Amino acid sequence: MAHLFVFRACRKERALMNMLELLQSECEKAGIECFVVGGALRDRLLNVATPEVDLAIATDPGQMVETLRERTGCSAFWLDRQRGILRISYLDEAFDLALLSGPLEHDLQQRDFTINAMAQRLEDYLNQSTEIIDPYGGRGDLGKRLLRPVTPDSMQADPVRILRGVRLLITRDLQLHEPSAGFLREASHLISSSPAERVSQELGRILTCANAPAGVDHLHHLGVVDALLPEVSAMRGVTQNKYHQYTVDDHANKAFAAFVDVIQRHQFLTERAAAWAAEYWSGITQDIRYVIMLAAWLHDIGKPPTRAVRNGKVTFYGHEHTGSAMSKDIARRLRLSRQQADLLQAFIKYHMYPMQLWRTGKLDGRLLHRYYHRVGSVGVPVVLFTLADHLAKGEAIAESEQFREHLQVVERFLEAWFEHSSDVVSPRPLLTGDEIAALLGQQPGPWLQRIKELLLEAQAGGQVAERSQAELFVRQAAQENEQGRRSR
């Protein structure tokens, strides 16, 4: 399989290079200059693979499309017709072809950071020449591992560039040019009025990368959090009870960092749990990864508004429900999809639920079924997050006996999902809703859903295994339900 992957990767890369070679040939025939700009050059100098190649051309990009389409069968569409930016794709590879906005140096001056404001003639790029057009010192900054805006107003022109800068800092091992840091901070308040789709896309790239905790630190330092997520800023300095060593904001940041270790690096987990975590993470899309990581960061946003002191003790009663409700506004602000918004709410609402079930001392198939039935598709990441939430309560938690017990409980939850789904998570009902109604001689109604849920829990817990047992259980459950209704 590894050899097949390499073959496909090489085939795709070769297809892209063939496209670029064909484009260069056509440009040469027409006497048109074409340049590779931005990230492709930056990453080549860093010896890092890049998924993107951006080109600038001194003519309408649309004029080049037909020849490329005829020769390769590629597809093309306008990313921005007004600005003349065309995306051309073939075999899952793509490059963007943009109209030069003026002289090349002027075009580069409009870019975000010096390390992205370099250019190279397409012919030189294909020949792997070292000759680069670099009017703003990007190559020198790259050698010093510095991230520096091209001009003082680069960030004001497009505040989303601040998020892109944070992503570059943490994915390319760079340091922010400190004299220029003020330019980013001064523009950070404009992010809240920037296009939400672009903001969300960049934020997602930050939160899902392996060095995401450092990204969160940069977001705080540059004022992005204050502008974009005031609910997170509100956690700052809020003290907690004796069970927490840290303030709410410190706890949230430490829990997020620990969650990156758990769900991406599979640290702290047992061998079996690590394999299941890897299976889960590799099986979800980038959009779902983003919302899972966002939820982990936001899990305690309900604490500041619910904080109270009762009998000398700090409490946060119902903070998970308050935080879940607060997340609706955040989801609208970031233009999350309906699915993402629902996942965000569910994660925050249920982030303590697995441990609440554990503390009952009765964690069996019945309660495991109830958990996954209620929590739904965030069941697995919420269980894994409980470890991070625990680790962020104080120092040396990982060596404690309670945490070792916690690990075993997490493995039980994961085993139910990955190994016993048909028995525990989603057992096949022994009786349908119509059969239950007929058995009890009643018309279907709201009462029926509760009986069905109780029967599935009994099946998951091993109390009911045969149809005759299911019929007896339903009669008893209906009788108890009726007695409870009369006593209220």
Image (tube, helix red, strand yellow):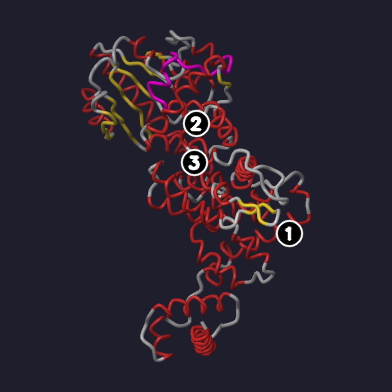
Mark 2 or 3, nearer chain start: 3
Real-space CA distance between mark 1 and mark 3, rounded to the nearest whole angstrom: 40 Å
Which residue sits at x=78%, y=52%? 400
Give how far across and how far down residue 336 sits, in percent: 40, 45
Real-space CA distance between mark 2 and mark 1, rounded to the nearest whole angstrom: 39 Å
Question: Is residue 323 toward the left or the right of residue 441 in the image?
Answer: right
Give how far across and how far down residue 273 sits, in percent: 64, 55
**Foreground label between 2 and 3:** 2
Q: Amino acid at mark 1?
A: Glu
Q: Amino acid at mark 3?
A: Phe
Q: Magenta segment range?
A: 143-160
Q: Circle 3 — which element?
A: helix
Q: Circle 1 — which element?
A: helix
Please tell me which residue lies in front, 185 or 254.
185
**Dot 1 alpha-carbon crowd within 10 angstroms: few under 14, some 14 to 19, many 20 or more:** few
Residue 63's quadrant in the figure? Answer: top left
Real-space CA distance between mark 2 and mark 3, rounded to the nearest whole angstrom: 39 Å
Q: Which residue is mark 1?
A: 405
Please tell me which residue lies in front, 302 or 2.
302
Disc on res. 5: 3
Q: Circle 2 — which element?
A: helix
Disc on res. 224: 2
Which residue sits at x=54%, y=23%? 47
- 148 within the magenta span: yes
Residue 186 sits above or below residue 358 on the image: above
Question: Is residue 404 toward the left or the right of residue 109 in the image?
Answer: right
Residue 2 sits above or below residue 132 on the image: below
Mark 1 or 3, nearer chain start: 3
